[in-house]
Image (cartoon, helix red, strand yellow):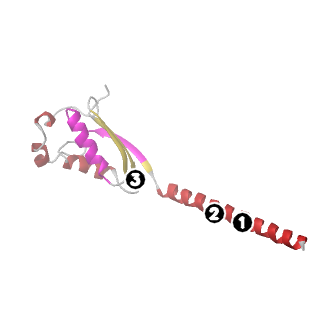
């Protein structure tokens, strides 16, 4: 009788252990599938602007684009660095979002209507250099 009870307990313990291992394996596979679907990219390009308020507006416009992970506009270099999932968006969508907020990029001129609504300190010279090295 003791042998039967011991055998049943041993079989149950092995069954529970294998279930735990299967659960862990499913979680790992799910994480792998998510990372395969993401295609992260980064890019930098010039954007005209003047001040800290410009920085907030430009970065806010970029961060509203689906797939953008981060955006950082450098006021001195007149350059933005963007990290994004290129399976959800592309460079032109990002350029267009900035232009819609009133700012010129290297590829798209800013919306004149949006530009006119910018605060005075943010109304930049349309001839200013962008994407400066220093």
Mark 1 or mark 2, which is nearer the start of the sequence? 1
| Residue 11 place in picture, x, y as percent | 80, 69
Callout in the foreground (2, 1): 1
Question: What distance separates the C-alpha of mark 2 from that of mark 1?
Answer: 11 Å
Left/right of residue 6 with respect to residue 14 in the rendered view: right
Figure check: 118 above or below 35: above
Callout in the foreground (1, 3): 1
Callout in the foreground (3, 2): 2
Q: Are marks 2 and 1 in contact (CB under 8 Å)?
A: no
Mark 3 or mark 1, which is nearer the start of the sequence? 1
Q: Which residue is mark 3?
A: 86
User: Which residue shows up at 25% across the image and 42% down it?
Assistant: 58
Figure check: 1 above or below 102: below
Highlighted range, magenta: 41-65
Q: Quadrant of the N terminus?
A: bottom right
- What secondary structure is found at the residue carrying circle 3? loop
Left/right of residue 35 with respect to residue 43 in the rendered view: right
Q: Which residue is mark 2?
A: 23
| Residue 67 place in picture, x, y as percent | 37, 53
Badge 1, how many Cα within 10 Å: few under 14, some, many 20+? few
Q: Which residue is mark 1?
A: 16
Q: In the picture, residue 32 is in which quadrant?
A: bottom right
User: Which residue shows up at 33% across the image and 55% down it?
Assistant: 66
Badge 3, how many Cα within 10 Å: few under 14, some, many 20+? some
**Towards the viewer: 70 or 47:** 70
Magenta stretch: residue 44 in it?
yes
Q: In the picture, residue 115 is in which quadrant?
A: top left
Figure check: 27 above or below 54: below
| Residue 130 place in picture, x, y as percent | 25, 34
**Towards the viewer: 77 or 53:** 53
């Amino acid at each position: 009788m003791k042998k039967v009870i011991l055998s049943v307990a041993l079989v149950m313990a092995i069954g529970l252990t294998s279930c735990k291992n299967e659960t862990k394996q499913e979680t790992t596979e799910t994480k792998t599938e998510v990372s395969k679907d993401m295609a992260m990219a980064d890019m930098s390009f010039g954007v005209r602007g003047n001040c800290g308020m410009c920085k907030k507006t430009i970065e806010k416009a970029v961060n509203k684009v689906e797939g953008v992970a981060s955006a950082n506009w450098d006021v001195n270099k007149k350059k933005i660095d963007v990290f994004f999932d290129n399976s959800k968006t592309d460079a032109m969508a990002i350029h267009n979002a900035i232009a819609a907020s009133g700012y010129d990029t290297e590829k798209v001129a800013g919306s004149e209507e949006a530009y006119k609504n910018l605060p005075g300190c943010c109304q930049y010279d349309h001839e200013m250099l962008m994407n400066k090295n220093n």
